[in-house]
Image (cartoon, rainbow, N blue to C red):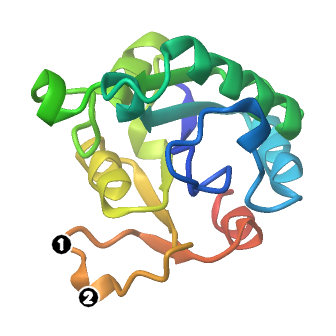
Amino acid sequence: MKKAIFLDKDGTLNIDIWYAYKKEDCTLLEPGIWGILRQFQQKWYFLIIVTNQAGIDKWYYKEDDFHVFMLELQKQLWITFNGIYFCPYHPDFSGESIFRKPNNGMLLQAQKDFDIDCSLSYMIGDNEKDIQAGKKSWCKTILYNSQNFDLKDFKNIPDFCVTSWNEIEKIID
């Protein structure tokens, strides 16, 4: 079985602006992320995006816009993700979905597609929904705390809480 790093997109890799979907709005959170992700790949981790993209369901942008954005993100990171999973649904528009975080449908699908051992894997995200999805899948969880959350407000406490990718690099072996 393989190990993976599941990554949220907005607020974890790129700056989270209101429904980031335009290629020109793609800005990395930190300049050195690409080097850290490459190190993880060299340690045989699969890099897999798992992201809610409700803006598609709300008609703010199209699925094609999301794919163009992802190509730009990969270009800026100088990497290719092993998998990109996204949930275009919002409960107010399409109803509940097992793929929408905090549910773990995207992680379970990737686990099946790539033969991943989630107990050897990590989920990195910037909010409690990401942490919940990771914990439901038995991953170790890392909160990239770009919003300065007070963890006492969380029902699901992450295994690690960081404010930089350099801290993440030190956690993942």
Does 102 appear above or below 62?
Answer: below
Assess disc 1: are there few (<14), some (14-19) or many (≥20) residues with their C-alpha within 10 Å of its C-alpha: few
Query: Which residue appears at 35% of the width and 18% of the height?
Result: 109
Query: Which residue appears at 49% of the width and 75% of the height?
Result: 147
Residue 97 visible to an observer of this rendering: no
Image coords of residue 158 (percent x, y): 37, 69
Image coords of residue 101 (percent x, y): 29, 41
List the single residue furthest toward the front.
60
Specify the amino acid type for callout 1: Lys
Between residues 75 and 135, which one lies in front from this camera angle? Answer: 75
Q: Secondary structure at mark 2?
A: helix
Q: Quadrant of the C terminus?
A: bottom right
Does 5 appear above or below 44?
Answer: below
Tell whether 90 sits left or right of 75.
left
Inter-mark Cα distance, 1 to 2: 8 Å
- Residue 95, label in figure: none
Tell whether 93 sits left or right of 73.
left
Specify the amino acid type for callout 2: Lys
Does 147 appear above or below 78?
Answer: below
Query: Which residue appears at 88% of the width and 59% of the height?
Result: 31
Image coords of residue 136 (percent x, y): 23, 46
Image coords of residue 36 (percent x, y): 82, 53
Q: Secondary structure at mark 1?
A: loop
Q: Quadrant of residue 141?
A: bottom left
Q: Quadrant of residue 157?
A: bottom left
Between residues 22 and 67, which one lies in front from this camera angle? Answer: 22
Between residues 25 and 124, which one lies in front from this camera angle? Answer: 25
Assess disc 2: are there few (<14), some (14-19) or many (≥20) residues with their C-alpha within 10 Å of its C-alpha: few
Tell whether 106 sits left or right of 155.
right
Residue annotated with mark 2:
152
Residue annotated with mark 1:
155
